Amino acid sequence: MAGDTQFQLVTFHLGEELYGVNIMDVKEIVKVQSVRVIPNAPYYVEGIINLRGEIIPIIALHKRFNIKAVQSAEDAEIEGGFIILNIDNSKIGIIIDKVARVVTVKAEDVKEPPQMLSGIGTEYIEGVIREDDGYLIMLNIRKVFNAKELQKIIDIQ
């Protein structure tokens, strides 16, 4: 069908769930680096990193969504990392447990999220895509932080 709207998602694990963000919002994926803590930052801001001379705030979505981080073996360092997002010309990093893959999704496969999903508010969720072994939660990265919070995060830089 020629009229199908398709887009790509970068998928990653947070706790037990599989999440995805639109690839157009993703600047890059980097491995774990040391994060410098910022005093008086919002509770979900882990700190900042210096990425090739750019200061980027790092957000712990685990804290934001109240998700338990997966405690795994020593290889966690290799799999985990940061996804650097470009939100309205500001770069923000989110901590992930493990990068999954890039998937192509048809717009018609995106379903309304159930009322309560793993404790994270449905207002942050763009939709849910059924997978063979469960589902993929598509985050609306612009709604994860309201404008005031976004400004606070950006001001950290």
Image (cartoon, rainbow, N blue to C red):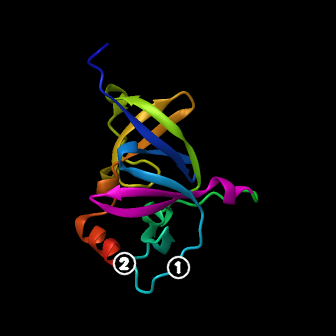
- Give the residue type at disc 1: Arg
- Give the residue type at disc 2: Ile
Other-residue count near label 2 (Cα within 10 Å), few / some / many at <14 / 14–19 / ≥20: some
Q: Position of residue 140 (x, y in %)?
A: 33, 49
**Mark 2 vs mark 1: which is more N-terminal?**
1
Please provide the residue range marked out in magenta: 75-95
Quarter where residue 119 is shown:
bottom left
Q: Are marks 2 and 1 in contact (CB under 8 Å)?
A: no
Q: Nearer the viewer, residue 64 or 39?
A: 39
Q: Position of residue 145 (x, y in %)?
A: 31, 63
In which quadrant of the rendered image does the N terminus lie?
top left
CA distance for labels 2 and 1 = 12 Å
Q: Which mark is residue 36?
A: 1
Q: Which mark is residue 51?
A: none
**On the rendered structure, is 4 left or right of 75?**
left
Q: Position of residue 156 (x, y in %)?
A: 36, 78
Q: Confirm whether the magenta stretch covers residue 88.
A: yes
**Local SS, label 1:** loop
Q: Residue visible at 26% across and 18% down?
A: 3
Q: Nearer the viewer, residue 45 or 116?
A: 45
Q: Which mark is residue 156?
A: 2
**Local SS, label 2:** helix
